[in-house]
Amino acid sequence: MLTERRATILGMVVSEYIQTAEPVSSRAIVDHHHLDLSTATIRNELARLEEEGYITQPYTSAGRVPSDLGYRTFVEVLMSEDPVLAAEQRTIEHQMHQVAGGLDEWLSLSATILAGAVGNVAVVTKPRARASRLRNAQLVELNREAALLVAVMDDGRVRQRMLPQRTPVTQAELSDRATRLNVRLEGLDATAVRALAAELPDTSEDAATARAIAELIDEQRTAEETFLDGLNAVLRQPEFSDVDRMLEAVATLQAYRVRRLLEEAVDAQPGATQVVIGHEHGDDALQEWSVVLSRYGDDDSHGTVAVIGPTRMAYHRTIPRVRYVAGLMSHLLHEVRQS
Amino acid sequence: MLTERRATILGMVVSEYIQTAEPVSSRAIVDHHHLDLSTATIRNELARLEEEGYITQPYTSAGRVPSDLGYRTFVEVLMSEDPVLAAEQRTIEHQMHQVAGGLDEWLSLSATILAGAVGNVAVVTKPRARASRLRNAQLVELNREAALLVAVMDDGRVRQRMLPQRTPVTQAELSDRATRLNVRLEGLDATAVRALAAELPDTSEDAATARAIAELIDEQRTAEETFLDGLNAVLRQPEFSDVDRMLEAVATLQAYRVRRLLEEAVDAQPGATQVVIGHEHGDDALQEWSVVLSRYGDDDSHGTVAVIGPTRMAYHRTIPRVRYVAGLMSHLLHEVRQS
DNA sequence: ATTAGCACTCTCGGCCTGAGAGTGCTAACG
DNA sequence: CGTTAGCACTCTCAGGCCGAGAGTGCTAAT
């Protein structure tokens, strides 16, 4: 049973270990918190905590290190979050507005900012629409035999593709065709666009264009779906002070593993921030890593923002910051998509 | 003076060192090539080569290691390229066709393939037009206060940005404005567009839109401009067997440094493959790295494909492979842009 | 329940050392 | 004169040893 006192001590062990990365001794606990107890008493309590599985010793007669259960308890009940103060909020928002580019730049930037704020690897996935709808399509003449089809989705994404023309066309004709199609297709999803295309004369250019639009709406980009930053920072953590560990870390953080992880773990209710610690996720390679993740966006279109680091991670700092950045992104995404 | 015999020996030293990463001894040279000379003779020649600056000793009485000059000589005159055999070509092309996505996916894939083929870091930059010109601009209503500006360049690139509106507008008004601007701006580069914008009433929405278009034409995507892969492989090279070196390597290879490097080094004639070895490039952080790079594309639109690795790199394998992949990409890019 | 005291355990860095690899030099040889 | 055998010398590197220090668990006393 976790008495109140032991809980307090456990909190001290976890905090201290998060800060120093050194096994925590009974002496350190007493001194750093000016406890009116002797080290021997603390040692007894530490022994109990170890029995109960909250902490372990790297070897006989070293200090104590939190176990996954210890971190879990810390996150759930012991820790108090380190709020994102107004000044820090301003800094983050300022950095966010640094770039005036498209969605990609903006996602990439947010990963960089978050990584900087928490000193670990940050990953942001591109928002994926449950089912995009067309807002507007345009046709641009490339040369006599081909046009470029540019489609803007209701979530602000822009997709393009080449569209070969059976007969030479002018820009004026293309614009006409686009206007004609926009009237009928705006606000429709891929299925509806296909249905409408089927009603048009099968060989008409309008039908071919509509079919191409439907494909664009369906298209899911596979590469470039995730943005990652902060590798450098995380590798400076003491857990990677040996070459093999470091190599392993670089390999583990390669996007394809990480991506699967993010997709698996999204059963959380949107808005909530989820924490997965060490052994809690199935993947063997991630037994010594923790992930803090949060969805952003809304029902129609959502992505994930996550921080990945060693289990010894500053949860009390990371959790509110992940939540804050996710909130910010929901907000910005909402703005882009109006409503 | 570099006699023929010394040149041969230098070639042996470089090849051997590239393969083993160990300082090369006189014994190793005689044994591995069944020379009819004693080690003492080789030692005399090695001493001469050292005097002339082609090789160095890490410490007194260790074997010899090539200097940058040694590698340079190897690359220019001693080495014979290891051609990309038909089977390997097929493998690479097969991998290339694995993906049916857009330009980005395809560039990312090519970096991965090249990295795998040479066992070092590969970087591919997005093709950039020498000076883009506007082909066509469109405005799409997002909500009452903001529109999305989508500009198509003459090289087929599409760029977009948000455009806040001072007063509420409808899609019809936006389309009118786009049509008006297209007539005047089509075919112009950023400077010309700016000049034209200056002639319009300063506070008009048309002027604001034209200025935004000019920015889009100029815009150099900072994020997502380069695709990099192979970090893992290169970190396994023995030169990074110590933690500090490895950290330094990860930091060095962060894209922003690398990007500048690629931009600096493009004075080569397109088509040719360029090799920069160690001290030859100015950047201090790259003194122990070599870069093999080649442009792809044509006069209108070109990017760079490069391999980055320790100076002890398998140049005879890397150079033809970089050239081959660049050629492949020129070809594919040509296809995409047809003509 | 708490604590002082103490024996015990284990790590870690420094130091030493011997083996081994490889060289440069000298003197002899064809 | 180029080549070579022989040898002394230099330097690295892995392994072993050792003492200091940190920290614990246990016991007995309060």
Image (cartoon, coloured by chain):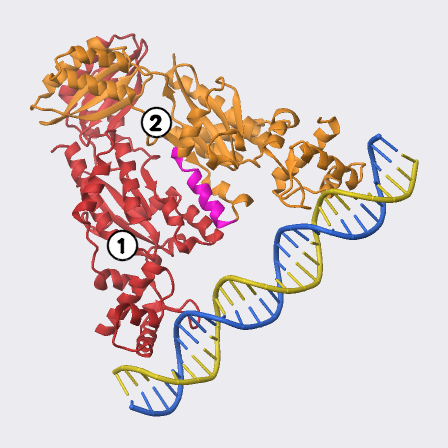
Chain colours: A red, B orange, C yellow, D blue
Rendered view: A314 above or below A257: below
- Between B143 and A198, the residue placed more toward the observer is B143
Measure how far apart labels 2 and 1 are at the Cα level. Answer: 34 Å
| Magenta range | B242-256
- Between A58 and B317, the residue placed more toward the observer is A58
In reply to whether residue A73 is colored magenta, the answer given is: no
- Between D19 and A44, the residue placed more toward the observer is D19
Residue A106 in the image: x percent, y percent?
26, 34
Q: Which mark is residue A154?
A: none
Say which quarter of the image contains residue B58: top right
Q: Is residue A337 left or right of residue B14?
A: left
Q: Which residue is mark 2?
A: B102
Residue B231 in the image: x percent, y percent?
45, 40
Q: Is residue A6 left or right of residue C21?
A: left
**Do dots 2 and 1 share one subunit?**
no
Q: Which mark is residue A275?
A: 1
Say which quarter of the image contains residue A180: top left
Callout 1 amino acid: Val
* Chain of residue at mark 2: B
Name the residue rendered at 23%, 61% in the picture: A79
In reply to whether residue B246 is colored magenta, the answer given is: yes
